[in-house]
Image (cartoon, helix red, strand yellow):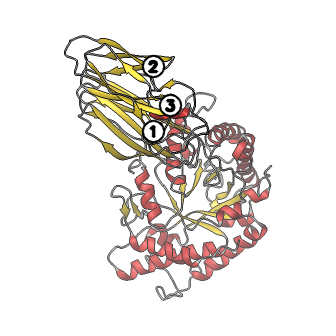
Amino acid sequence: MKPLNIFLALCAMLPMTACSDDDTYEPSALPTTFTVSASDLTYLKTEHTITVYVQAPAQPSVSTDASWLTVTTPVLNDQSKRIYRFDVTAAANDSHDTRTAAITVTQASNKATINVTQRYADGILVDAVSTTDPFSANGGTLTVSIQATGEYTYELPYWVTEETVSGSRAMASTTHTFTIAANNGNARSTDIVFTLVDDATLSATVTISQLLSQASTGKTAAAVASQIFAGWNLGNTMEATGGSETSWGNVKTSKEIIDVVKAAGFNAVRIPCSWDQYIIDDNYTIDPAWLSRVGEVIDYVVNDNMYAVLNIHWDGGWLEENANATAQAENVAKQKALWTQIATAFEGYDDHLLFAGCNEVRNTSGSGWNGPTAEEEGALEAYLQAFIDAVRATGGNNSTRNLIVQCWCCNGWRALDSLTMPTDPAGSDHLMMEMHFYDPSAMTHEGSTTMWGYRAGYVSSNDGLQEDYIDSFFGQIKAKYVDKGIPVILGEYGTCCWSTTDADIMASQAYYLRYVTAAAKNNGMVPFYWDNGSPGIGSFGVINRGALAVGLPHFVEGIMAGAAEGQYPF
């Protein structure tokens, strides 16, 4: 059976008329065109009915000499005066052989033949699909009618959901109604494969495609930053080495996980990402399957109306640990090659997607986590410039996509004394600077102290790393960058959890997160909490990804309270 054996396909042939189950519109003169929606019908061995539609200026007649076919008299399709419909029912095939017949449709001098085939076989067929055209970026509804001789199974991508099923999958005729979600990113397509349970070699496929988002980039960095309420890191996942996003113990990222993140109050996700292990040749070609998987995760975020930040993270250290003159030329070439592919793959995304050039770049054979030499800082800035040049050269939405560059080690003090911002062909108002913040490390990482907050009375010593320290440090960042039109991404911050039972420790840690989050926003810094996975003592995790739930409510409450209190100065 050809795809035109459907009512909506016939409607597509009639651009000047309305066509629906409640079709009341009439042109000034009825059309004289004679069109039949099917030229071929195919049946399996079980009894089954298919509806055929005819456009004609008057009622047509139908006939067949096949005793195993029952054809109803054509009638007007509801209120239409030019679309007729009739049913063709094939009886169960007991002949133990394939059989064929013909149906003749006539109206005055107009005549059409429909060839009918009925197999003596088990199987599964797609009787009708409500549209074969690409869906718009706004999404829509798809109806699929299935003919099958037994129960069947199928899987849907995250952006297609099933709304209703009419009939049983074990019946000869079943109609499925699917909803196609809105698309904020690249064009996409999928195959829905309906497979018989009793024989996996028998299947039918429906291909769905959807156009890319028509929204363009162009908002300034400050305009986008101002829309981010609170950010969250999908840590220790897409950047995990070992050949899989689950290699470091976290579950595979799903739409449901991102839905939980959104429900917790976050509206942006930073996606630390590995690329080196997915290079498949000497030209630094990225495995298309990995690009596709990264795109799925980005889609989970942006199609939840959240912002996504994609970077090159630790990645085995080829870039991050080698800011030196020896590695510079090769790393610049590799950086350009990777970002050209990444930017090209995701060019269709709108302002909800941001790119970050690298992560905590340093030189392990030199200054390490300390301040850089001029040569080391020069290597970092060459990597950042290569990133910007590669992205901008891909054109389209990437011409003005907001890009994020990093200071040495992502240590904010190095942003104050070392970093020179790179040159951007799009202008300085499409760049952001990134730093991370984990002070005091005695609490955030080590656990030698578990409480913080001099002004709130949680600690008795204002040791220089309390509220006054944050106010002074963040204020200096604001003066050097934000006040000059460059928003800052606080790409990582947070603390390990040190108790889930001690009320004082829990309250102090929540206060720390509240204070840092509010202070960041007040100083033009967009906060992204670092979540490395399973919540628990000694972990930064706040979302229980396996259980699809908030794992540390007091942490999240502190972050959200600070996000609500803080007000960006732009």
Foreground pick, 2 / 56: 56
Q: Residue furthest left?
A: 94
Residue 227 visible in this rendered orientation of the protein: yes
- Could you tell me residue 6's position as x and y percent? 44, 31
Q: Give the mark, 2 or 1, whose residue is nearer the N terminus.
A: 2
User: Gap between marks 3 and 1, in whole Å?
Assistant: 49 Å
Residue 287 visible in this rendered orientation of the protein: no
Foreground pick, 60 / 374: 60
Q: Amino acid at mark 2?
A: Thr
User: Gap between marks 2 and 1, in whole Å?
Assistant: 63 Å
Foreground pick, 99 / 15: 15
Q: Amino acid at mark 3?
A: Leu
Q: Is residue 427 above or below residue 131?
A: below
In this picture, residue 118 sits left or right of residue 229: left
Q: Which residue is mark 1?
A: 243
Q: Give the mark, 2 or 3, whose residue is nearer the N terminus.
A: 3
Q: Which residue is mark 3?
A: 10
Q: How many marks?
A: 3
What mark, if any, has residue 106 been given in the picture?
Answer: 2
